[in-house]
Image (cartoon, rainbow, N blue to C red):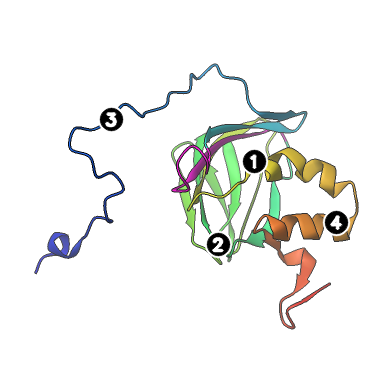
Amino acid sequence: MSYFENMRYPEPHYHGDKGEVSASFRSADTPAEVSSPGGSTSYLATQESTGGEFGLYKGVLGPRSAGAKEHFHRAMSESFYVLSGELELYDGEKWVTGREGDFLYVPAGGLHAFKNVTDDPVSMLMLFAPGAPREEYFERVAEMSQRGPEQLKEFRVRHDSYFVEDFDFGTGQAQ
């Protein structure tokens, strides 16, 4: 049996005979949903709009932006596709420089981090699968980081984001 004969499509989600009008369009000039001096996040496809299949977001990090420190997700994978600029990506073992067209896939449980160490902005796509309600995370993480480490840690865990700095994974206990 060939490789392609072993490949299977998922079970159908649509059971009609004629198709339906159900596509959605987002113009490139739609303003970002979250903006700050350090960057912006645009909601291209949310858990709600895709029926939970995936979430797709465009992120822009300003010059010298810290991004996200080392962490992992238990319920979803995260993928990064660099649109422009240079994005430092941590793949769980080492930092690599992602440039236009580069892609990093991180399965559930995979350690990863990202940051912009250049003097220029960087833009990227972030894909979460299956879809998760990431919007509150993007909208409130800056605010929560001002409230102190315990509230930030609780917020991160509620959003399936397990940061290495928050836990002693040798014992499973919060630090």
Question: Residue lying furthest left in this view?
Answer: 1
Quarter in which the N terminus is drawn: bottom left
To which residue does mark 4 refer?
A: 151
Q: Amino acid at mark 4?
A: Gln
Task: Please check the rendered image and state whether residue 26 is part of the magenta-colored stretch, yes or no.
Answer: no
Which numbered circle lies on residue 75? 2
Task: Please rate how many residues cluster around mark 3, counting C-alpha atoms within 10 Å: few if below 14, some from 14 to 19, many from 20.
Answer: few
Using residue 109 as the reference point, say whether residue 9 is left or right of it: left
Describe the element under mark 4 as helix, strand or loop.
helix
The residue under the point 65% across, 30% down is 121
Which residues, given as a range, are shown in magenta? Answer: 46-63
The residue under the point 11% across, 65% down is 2
To which residue does mark 1 refer?
A: 135
Q: Earlier in the sequence, mark 4 or mark 1?
A: 1
Looking at the image, is 28 positioned above or below residue 130? above
Q: Earlier in the sequence, mark 4 or mark 3?
A: 3
Describe the element under mark 1 as helix, strand or loop.
helix
For residue 110, which quarter of the picture?
A: bottom right
Asked if the residue at tag 1 contacts the one at tag 3, i.e. Cβ–Cβ closer than 8 Å, the answer is no
Question: In the image, residue 13 lies at what x, y percent?
Answer: 31, 48
Question: In the image, residue 19 lies at what x, y percent?
Answer: 23, 33
Marks 2 and 1 sit apart, C-alpha to C-alpha, by: 16 Å
Quarter in which the C terminus is drawn: bottom right
Looking at the image, is 168 positioned above or below residue 134? below
To which residue does mark 3 refer?
A: 20
